[in-house]
Amino acid sequence: MPTRILLIDDDQVDRTAVRRALAKSGLAHDLTEASDGTTGLRLAQGQAFDCVLLDYRLPDVDTFELLAALLSPAGGTQAVLMLTGEDDPDVAFRLMRAGALDYLAKAEATPSSLARAIRYAKARREFLAELNTARREAEAKSQELDTLNQQKSLLFSIISHDLRNPFQALLGLSTVLSQAVAERDHATVERRAKGIQEAASQAYGLMEGLFAWASLQMDTVTVTLGDVDLE
């Protein structure tokens, strides 16, 4: 797939030089040219480019404002390579801090150096796209885990509430039963023993339901589907 390149430069001679250098570089590419910053930004917003070759001095826009726009999501988050006729380390440092990926002097932009810088820009753009995708997936997983933790907390709250009732009944009935045995009150013993049995059956049924639910969550239960005669 050819590398999609946007060249923004107001000097026709410089654009021709870049075009020729790319033709000699052996880099498979698709070059789009813009003669001013306003047109270049509109092109960048309308389609995706692997990198932008941006002239440092354009008459219609501020370079740093255009660079920020090209790097923004609205501008296509392009990888931007600066081209300049000046050799000023301070300007290069400021542009790199502002987000430019590289800084090439036009006089030193040979076919090989230009192709190498563009390949690096394309690889970096693809890496950042993969990184953003991974970050979005991680955020989605984190949100899913938060939801599961909330559901788990709610489930534990319900379980603790439902288990407390039958065990409170067991404790209370067993205390009364002990007193009835000591007093040889057979009617009370029989009635309380029946209550204990009911409370124990309720607790056992609840525990069985929880074990069945846990087995379903761990996929340890085999489900067999079959026809049922409703009549």
Image (cartoon, rainbow, N blue to C red):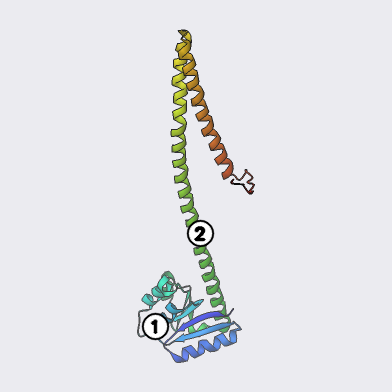
Residue most extreme to the top: 183
Location of residue 43 in the rendering, given as x and y in whole percent from the top left corner: 43, 81
List x then y, in percent, for residue 77: 45, 72
Q: Tell me where residue 27 appears, x and y as whole percent.
A: 59, 82
Residue occupying the point 56% across, 82% down: 29
For the residue pair 187 and 197, the one nearer the viewer reads as: 187
As helix, strand or loop, the secondary structure at mark 1 comes to: helix
The residue under the point 59% across, 82% down is: 28
Q: What's under tag 2, amino acid-wise?
A: Glu
- Observer able to see residue 72: no
Q: Which mark is residue 37?
A: 1
Say if 155 sits above or below 93 in the image. Answer: above
Q: Residues within 10 Å of mark 1 (few under 14, many from 20)?
A: many
Which is more toward the observer, 125 or 106? 125
Please state which amino acid type lies under the numbered disc 1. Answer: Gly
Image quadrant occupied by the C terminus: top right
